[in-house]
């Protein structure tokens, strides 16, 4: 028993000894005494020091050699880069190329280039080609070169743009049948070119044309801006350059075209007939505005460019054309600002047997459906400051629109009653006091002008979403019919959106006697208001033949397009807006700097 017990007690001791020996690390070969550095560590440090010494010697040797050799020549730049670094010489270089081309008997301006596809048709037909695939059928397209980039001496890429669409030209020397180096070198950004070749896609899947020939059809003699053209003066004065460089400008005028087309279709669909009336008038009538004057040599008399087509259109209603409209230019010799241009485009229509209530419903239907079709929503987002990154405002065209009676709204706003008859002498004093109280000044202080200013300062500023300001006093509306419930008011409305007038409409005055009286009253105001109407005897005579109950309507198309395109300046929606004269050559300089 004793022997067994002794053996059992001894096993744990052997286990503990084994664990202790396992925890102790074996001594490193060549280890130094405790507290010193081993021989292997000393060798490693010595090798690292030697390596650093040799690297320092090589760097010093290179620096000495570079110093002895002098400064290195700069890397040669591509010819395209050198040319575009000297914009002042660019035109001279291009003109020299034109001269050289003519001398060689090859016109730089050929009469015609036959194309097989427009850009849009090309993209539609060949967009399904697989990446890396190239067809064998030959095609021909044309457009403007907007980007050029070389990938070595044998491969050059171009972006060919036309009708707002882009096709890549992938010019490969191995498949090019002409003088590859000469043709690709001569082709510059901005040139109009014709390309014959084969449709296909690059390995990355970009739709391209692989050319066998590139012909310059019209060289661009000026250096195009590399980035977006921002300078407004240059954009408005050289709209062609703006359209070349800025895609967004093209989109604005496409929207304008779509809006006019929709308006025309809408009126045609409601049985209106489009007509044209004279631009040159014997009497400037149809609106209260200052006209442009001209002179007819044969007739030996002064003529006026029309300020409105209204009187002619109502004569046509007298003649039996019950629904008639005109889309055209008007001319008013007035100021230029963010919302006014001396010549502008409007639509006017006249509708027999309708009144201004019908017109308000018709206007709601027209504008709400137009906005929905052109933008996809009844709501349009604009930026009132003109900064696309700034504060947004939502304009809601969902019908029905708000209606705001003019005099009643002013009375509620000011807390005082207005005189019934604003044509009486006491009304002038009343309006003058109101204007002074609210720091409002009129250029020509007449009752109509003062009232218009009050409305502008107090009511129009509240009209963000579409709002009808309606029931104008008689003194403001010489061609409108008296209101059937208040003889001192007229059945007239103006539509305001984002505080700006867009439409003007009313039930037409068709009593020739009252119309003559209104004209005479306007003439009496000529001394104070040079925009007052003259007497148009031909129009009064036409009324004597009988104008049926009629409603008339006019809308400024330019302002409509401003709303649809989020443009706060009318110049943005006019291809060639009126500009102050500029010194010769400064516009071109501005374009080159851009």
Image: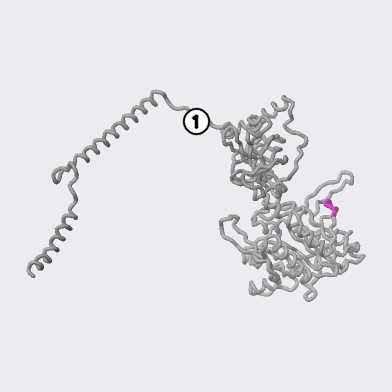
Indicate the position of residue 38 as horizontal and vertical percent values.
Answer: 18, 41
Q: Nearer the viewer, residue 411 or 91?
A: 91
Indicate the position of residue 58 as horizontal and vertical percent values.
Answer: 34, 29
Local packing at callout 1 (Cα closer than 10 Å; few below 14, some 14-19, many 20+) is few
480 sits left or right of 237 in the view:
right
Was residue 277 drawn as part of the magenta stretch in this picture? yes
Indicate the position of residue 394 as horizontal and vertical percent values.
Answer: 62, 64
**What is the secondary structure assignment of the residue under circle 1?**
loop
For the stretch drawn in magenta, the main secondary structure is: loop
262 sits left or right of 89 in the view:
right
For residue 532, which quarter of the picture?
bottom right
Q: Residue furthest top?
A: 68
For residue 365, which quarter of the picture?
bottom right
Residue 353 visible in this rendered orientation of the protein: yes
Q: Nearer the viewer, residue 561 or 213?
A: 213
Indicate the position of residue 164 as horizontal and vertical percent values.
Answer: 68, 48
Quadrant housing the N terminus = bottom left
Q: Nearer the viewer, residue 376 or 203?
A: 203
Quadrant housing the C terminus = top right
Count of labels in the image: 1
Question: Which residue sits at x=72%, y=73%?
Answer: 419
Was residue 556 drawn as part of the magenta stretch in this picture? no
Q: Residue furthest left?
A: 2
In magenta, the rendered stretch is 276-282
Q: Residue furthest right?
A: 545
Residue 590 visible in this rendered orientation of the protein: no
For residue 416, which quarter of the picture?
bottom right
Render colour scheme: one colour
Residue identified by numbered label 1? 75
């Amino acid at each position: 028993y004793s022997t067994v017990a002794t053996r059992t007690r001894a096993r744990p001791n052997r286990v503990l000894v084994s664990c202790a020996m396992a925890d102790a690390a074996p001594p490193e070969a060549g280890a130094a005494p405790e507290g010193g550095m081993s021989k292997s560590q000393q060798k490693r440090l010595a090798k690292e020091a030697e390596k650093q010494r040799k690297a320092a010697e090589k760097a010093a040797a290179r620096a000495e050699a570079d110093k002895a050799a002098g400064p290195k020549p700069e890397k040669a730049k591509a010819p395209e880069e050198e040319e575009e670094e000297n914009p002042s010489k660019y035109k001279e270089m291009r003109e020299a190329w034109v001269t050289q081309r003519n001398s060689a008997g090859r016109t730089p301006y050929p009469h015609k280039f036959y194309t097989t596809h427009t850009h849009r048709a090309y993209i539609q037909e060949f967009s399904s080609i697989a990446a890396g695939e190239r067809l064998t059928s030959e095609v021909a397209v044309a457009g403007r070169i907007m980007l050029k980039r070389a990938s070595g001496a044998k491969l050059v890429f171009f972006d060919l743009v036309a009708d707002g669409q882009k096709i890549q030209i992938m010019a490969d020397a191995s498949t090019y049948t002409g003088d590859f180096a000469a043709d690709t070198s001569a082709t510059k950004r901005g040139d109009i070119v014709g390309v014959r070749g084969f449709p296909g896609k690059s390995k990355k899947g970009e739709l391209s044309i692989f050319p066998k020939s590139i012909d310059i059809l019209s060289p661009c003699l000026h250096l195009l801006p590399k980035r977006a053209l921002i300078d407004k003066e240059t954009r408005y004065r050289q709209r062609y350059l703006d359209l070349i460089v800025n895609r967004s400008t093209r989109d604005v005028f496409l929207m304008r075209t779509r809006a006019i087309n929709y308006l025309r279709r809408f009126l045609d669909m409601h049985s209106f007939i489009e007509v044209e009336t004279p631009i040159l008038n014997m009497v400037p009538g149809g609106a209260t505005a200052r006209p442009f004057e001209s002179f007819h040599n044969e007739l030996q008399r002064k003529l006026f460019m029309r300020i409105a087509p209204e009187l002619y259109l109502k004569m046509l209603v007298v003649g039996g054309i019950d629904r008639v409209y005109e889309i055209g230019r008007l001319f008013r010799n007035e100021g230029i600002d963010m919302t006014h241009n001396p010549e502008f485009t409007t639509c006017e229509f006249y509708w027999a047997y309708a009144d201004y209530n019908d017109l308000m419903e018709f206007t709601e239907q027209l504008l709400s459906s137009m906005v929905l079709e052109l933008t996809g929503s009844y709501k349009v987002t604009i930026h009132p400051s003109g900064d696309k990154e700034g504060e947004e405002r939502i304009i809601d065209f969902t019908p029905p629109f708000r209606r705001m009676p003019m005099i009643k709204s002013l009375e509620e706003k000011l807390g005082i009653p207005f005189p019934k008859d604003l044509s009486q002498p006491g009304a002038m004093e009343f309006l003058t006091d109101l204007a002074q109280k609210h720091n409002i000044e009129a250029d020509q202080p007449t009752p109509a002008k003062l009232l218009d200013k009050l409305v502008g300062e107090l009511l129009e500023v509240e009209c963000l979403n579409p709002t009808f300001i309606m029931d104008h006093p008689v003194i403001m509306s010489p061609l409108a019919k008296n209101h059937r419930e208040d003889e001192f008011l007229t059945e007239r409305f103006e539509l305001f959106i984002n505080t700006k007038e867009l439409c003007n409409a009313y039930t037409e005055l068709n009593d020739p006697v009252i119309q003559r009286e209104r004209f005479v009253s306007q003439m009496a105001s000529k001394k104070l208001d040079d925009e007052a109407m003259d007497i148009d005897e031909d129009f009064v005579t036409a009324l004597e033949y009988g104008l049926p109950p009629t409603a008339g309507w006019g809308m400024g198309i330019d302002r409509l397009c401003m709303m649809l395109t989020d443009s706060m300046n009318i110049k943005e929606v006019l291809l060639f807006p009126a500009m102050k004269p500029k010194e010769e050559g400064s516009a071109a300089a501005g374009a080159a700097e851009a």
